[in-house]
Amino acid sequence: MRKLSFLGCSVALGLTVSAAQAQNNTGEVEQIRRQLQQAYEAFQKAVENYRQVTESLNQRLEQLQPKEGRAAPPVAAKPSAAGTTNVPAAAVAESKPWSPTDPIRIGTAQNYIGVSFDALVAAGYSTATDIESLQLGGHDPKQRGFTVQNLETTFDGKVDPYFRGQANIVLQIDPEGETIIEAEEAYLETMSLPWNLQVKAGQYFTEFGRLNPTHPHTWDFVDQPLVNGRFFGEDGLRNAGARVSWLLPTPFYSELFLGMQNSQGETATSFRDSHEDSLRFGRPAVDTRVKGFGDMLYAPRYVASFNLADEHTVVAGASGAFGPNASGTKTDTQIYGVDLFYKWKPRWHSKGFPFVSWQTEAMYRRYEAGAFAGDVDNPALPSETLRDWGLYSQLNWGFRRGWVASLRGDYVTGEKAALNPDPDRDKRWRVSPALTYYPTEFSKLRLQYNYDDREHVGTDHSVWLQFEFLLGAHAAHKF
Amino acid sequence: MKNSLSILSLAAVLFAARSAQAKLNVVATLPDFGAIAEAIGGDKVKVTSIARGTEDPHFVDARPSFIRVLNQADVLIEGGAELEIGWLPPLVNSARNAKILSDAPGHVILSRGIRLLDVPTGPVDRSMGDVHPLGNPHYASDPANGKIMAATIAAAFSKLDTPNAAFYEANLKKFNDRLDARLAEWSKAMEPFRGTKVITYHKSFDYLLERFGLVLAGTIEPKPGIEPSPTHINALIPRARAEGVKLVIIEPNRPRKTPTYVADSIGAKLLLVPQMVGGHEKIKDYFSLFDYDLARIAEALKQSK
């Protein structure tokens, strides 16, 4: 306020003074005005001239620039780098501007999201008439003829400087011809937490053993192992949750995981799965509400890896999954697993061939089953503990470029309990030889034979032919 | 809880101790990059290379031990241009090391600043094989590109370890002077064979051929990364014979059967040429890679004259 009044005073004063002078020297003022006008006009003209010159130079520059390349690479700009030899100057690949006629590519280095689509289809025949109960995996071939096993769209990318994100949306066509959609995984993962920690959160496959966290197209066989089918259900153990992992400061690789996930739903089959109101182990599902932290699913895992004599790699792990189950109000399930993976790949491999790999997982499940009073159709069952175990062991031999011969053995069994027989717990084993041909990393063709022996059912033979194709950015696989 | 906290703080202490060490911990994806890093870094750096010199650089296993190696790295040097796309990303994702994330100064991509060959000008799809949309990533086989790579590495080292910037700058100069001298020698030795036509297995020696004036007359692979087919080989043989191809150059890890057949059919010599440092016991650094490879090529061409 005070500033304003001061300004007003000085302007008024200035005006009074100039008015007095104007009366004295009208002629001189007139002359100065004329000179000022001329100078101003000359100034305008010069500006216009320079503007024209600048404009034409700019145009010329624009005409020349695309031919010479825009951004000089930072390195080539250094004289010491360019030296005397004939070093090429411009990085053409990096400086090419996008034009509407260019193909729109998804998944190259410049994109924010990597998108890929993978289709897994099987065809074959089985002597079993109940193929849907013979094959335990949700993405296994499940009928004579063709099965669309897995149509998977994967999105992945860096979210921001802190997270990377991934989502796997899966479509499949069931034996009735209905298309099923699954939000299989959608999670974020931190990239640079302190102390070698990493957090993963969202919907994700529990890091239990080697096979459970992987997607069907990375499997070495047409179907999933029996023990995984029995303990983790059709679609593997996965749920919404969060886990933290710690990369230990050991001289070798070792990592500790601790996850907490929801324990309900069909993707937690050994836990609080309502199993669509049918009976499991002869018992119906009871109340599946979460009352506290004790009702969550906890999954610890430790994994370590060693390189033996350069060409040999071993990865060994131990996992657990603990949580309540749906057979009673105070019944829990514990699953323990150990896994071992060995791979030989010579120093002289070409395109990753030849190689030999061997993978084995053994699991034990302790299921506290609640008492069931029985009903018209079903017998009463006592409160008891059901003990099951199972394992699979598989050998892959990449004997020449693109060709892999495989052999897998499966065994699952349960300690006899009040409900007997129970096809979900009875002893069964399976032997599966397979031959896979990979024309490239983006397609494969696989022939597999299964010899099945189920207690109280008998033996069955199945032959499956599987093919796969993959479009788009193929995210590299973990070892 | 108390236990895990003390373990955590122990880890933090271990880490602090590590970062206090003077040496830059450098991890290179390929031994060629590692060899240049050693020449620039001298005793101020500790260099670990992930791939072995005998391996196919596109198909290196992402072994978990590398997660630990990358976790401790101050600098990650990669070739870029999708050379390591099949195995490096999951390792970096698992390494939880902010120093080597994509935009960090410790993440050095050597293809920057290098003129790449075979950059597709039209649309690219996978029916063309493994065509790299950014261009042929095997640029390290041109020794002149070694100067660009060395400059990129020296710039990164100087930025990350400012007190030793002058040391890296001096080593860069030494490296460049030595490379200039050798380039002159190599060019002189290869001069008589300028224009000679050769066949390679994969498009992995294009940069080397271009540098020394050799002409690529065809590849055993019909398309990059695609296995040879009888149709392709049957078309390649008469063409190569007509063009007077003298040499079939393959990396030692490639299948030999088809290249041998092609070489025998056209009366050319089959030559095994290691692609990377460590590809042969005599190839111990970046200079001996070219000493060895070019001597072999020159000798084979001399014999076939």
Image: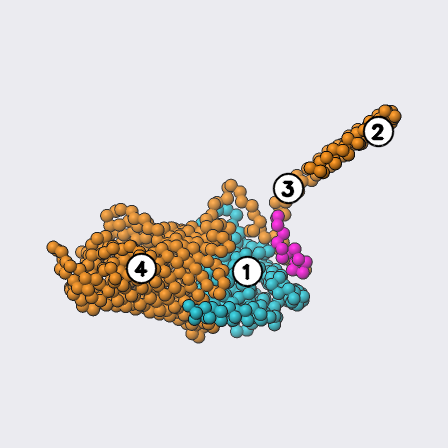
Mark 2 or 4: in front is 4
Taking A88 as reference, is B162 above or below it?
below
Range shown magenta: A69-82
- The residue carrying mark 3 is A62
- Find residue B4 and report its horizontal and vertical position in percent: 43, 69
* Dot placed on the residue nearer the N-terminal end, 4 or 3: 3
- The residue carrying mark 1 is B107
Identify the hue of chain A: orange
Mark 2 or 3: in front is 2
Taking B102 as reference, is A13 above or below it?
above
Q: Amino acid at mark 4?
A: Asp
Q: CB atoms at circles 1 and 2 under 8 Å apart?
A: no
Q: Amino acid at mark 1?
A: His
Query: For mark 3, does the 10 Å Cα neighbourhood hold few (<14), some (14 to 19), or many (20 or more) residues?
Result: few
Identify the hue of chain B: cyan
- The residue carrying mark 4 is A295
Say whether residue A72 is magenta: yes
**Residue at disc 4, secondary structure:** helix
Main SS, magenta region, reads loop
Task: Evaluate whether label 4 is on the same chain as label 3.
Answer: yes
Report if residue B60 is visible in the image: no
Residue at coordinates 34% horizontally, 62% vertically from top-left? A298
**Residue at disc 1, secondary structure:** strand
Task: Evaluate whether label 2 is on the same chain as label 4.
Answer: yes
Between marks 4 and 1, how big is the CA–CA gap?
A: 44 Å
* Dot placed on the residue nearer the N-terminal end, 2 or 4: 2
Query: For mark 4, does the 10 Å Cα neighbourhood hold few (<14), some (14 to 19), or many (20 or more) residues?
Result: many
Quadrant where the C terminus of chain A sits is bottom left
Between marks 4 and 3, how big is the CA–CA gap?
A: 68 Å
